[in-house]
Amino acid sequence: MAEPKPSIQQLVETLDLEPHVEGGYFKQTFKADAQPLINTPKGTRVTMTSIYYLLSADSPIGHFHRNTSDIMHYFHAGDPITYYLIHPDGTLQTKVLGPDVLAGHEYQFVVKGGVWKASSISPQGQNGYGLIGEAVAPGFEYTDMELANRQVLREKFPQHASLITRLTREH
């Protein structure tokens, strides 16, 4: 007999998730504050931080943003999440983080710092959510993240204008 799947509300409550500025829900689960700090161009940082990140049918988009640090993404549960990565040279890469490696899903992948990233799940997915973990090194600070300005990003990458329009918030 299959284990019952948690609902979105159960996950939000049990994992103590809160709305994230880029869309979805999150909770920081680890901060390497017992380790020596790392000097970066933006200041000192812990060596690593980690979060849960949840996209759901009611919040299915992680809007385009970029981070200074590298981020390793890990699939945990639910529906596959599609990632859209725009590299500094304008190359678009699409990856799917999900449970079915035979269908081309990945269980984990890294997004290097400086790459524009957006993510989405289908609101009609079987589970209604996708839950992942992210490990960020050097550790995450909000000052190291930039939410995309739709107009600026479309001007920089006009070949991806329709995708950028769909996966950004208007400023």
Image: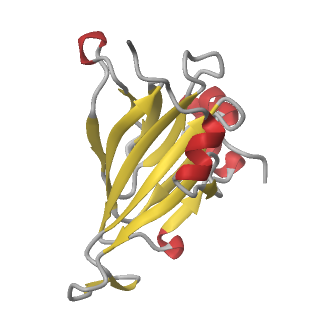
Image spot of residue 97 (x, y percent): 37, 30
Q: Is residue 88 visible?
A: no
* Side of 45 relative to 159 (left or right): left
Q: Quadrant of residue 135?
A: bottom left
Question: Which quadrant holds the C terminus?
Answer: bottom right
Residue placed at 38% from the left, 48% from the top? 133
Residue placed at 65% from the left, 58% from the top? 21
Observer-nearest residue: 81 or 70?
81
Image spot of residue 150 (x, y percent): 69, 46
Compared to 64, does 98 lie above or below? above
Compared to 110, does 1 lie above or below? above
Image spot of residue 90 (x, y percent): 43, 39
Observer-nearest residue: 4 or 113?
4
Residue that sits furthest to the left in the current view: 36
* Side of 75 relative to 81 (left or right): left
Residue that sits furthest to the right in the current view: 171
